[in-house]
Amino acid sequence: MTFHTTADVWVHGSRIQLIRLLDNLLTNARRHAKTAVTVRVESTDGQAVVTVTDDGDGIAPADRERIFERFTRLDEGRRRDTAGTGLGLAISRDIAHAHHGTLRIEDSPRGARFVLRLPLLNRNAIDGRHLIRTGRTTSNQTADDR
């Protein structure tokens, strides 16, 4: 696996659910990759964008929405892993939607390319308070407290 990241990218959400979503994407990519998985994290147009791309056979355009349906497993997936339930990608998309985001498959020159988009967290203004980074800790202070 290769990881590419840009500056800090922060989102607001359930840590456990977001970890599950990312674990599902990475597990799926590893299962279908021939030799490599690439993960890219960046911010674009007010969104955190996480792209997980494998170098496997890819997913036919006709199946790209279908694989997000519960209990759907393509023939290739059943061949590679007989124990799967076909729930991972459906759950992942549900988690993305619950966090006001999207999870889609987009065109890729090779393999499958999953793209997760979530709203960026504005770390400078949360509930009218400002986050001030002091050394290792982050504290909340209002403008009046400074």
Image (spheres, helix red, strand yellow):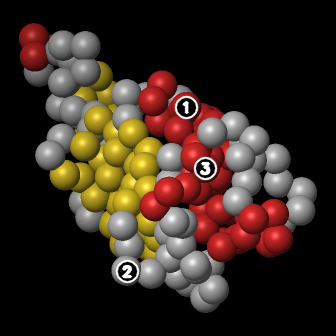
Residue 71: give its label.
none
Q: Secondary structure at mark 2?
A: loop
Amino acid on which disc 2 is placed: Pro
Using the image, determine if residue 42 lies above or below residue 120: below
Mark 2 sits on what residue? 109
Q: Residue 29, position in %: x, y?
A: 60, 68
Q: Residue at x 29, y 35 (%)?
A: 119
In which image quadrant can residue 124 be found?
top left
N-terminal-most mark, 3 or 1: 3
Quadrant that contains the C terminus: top left
Counting other residues with Cα less than 10 Å from the Cα at mark 2, is it few (<14), some (14-19), or many (20 or more)?
few
Q: Nearer the viewer, residue 50 or 72?
A: 72
Q: Is residue 116 left or right of residue 35?
A: left
Q: Is residue 43 left or right of residue 22?
A: left
Q: CA distance from mark 3 to mark 1?
A: 13 Å
Residue at the front extreme, as displayed:
62
Q: Residue 35, position in %: x, y?
A: 61, 88
Q: Secondary structure at mark 1?
A: helix
Q: Residue at x 21, y 17 (%)?
A: 129
Amino acid on which disc 3 is placed: Ile
Mark 2 touching mark 3, by CB under 8 A?
no
Q: Nearer the viewer, residue 75 or 145?
A: 75
Quadrant that contains the N terminus: bottom right
Q: Residue 89, position in %: x, y?
A: 62, 46
Q: CA distance from mark 2 to mark 3?
A: 20 Å
Mark 1 sits on what residue? 94
Residue 134 seen: no
Mark 3 sits on what residue? 67
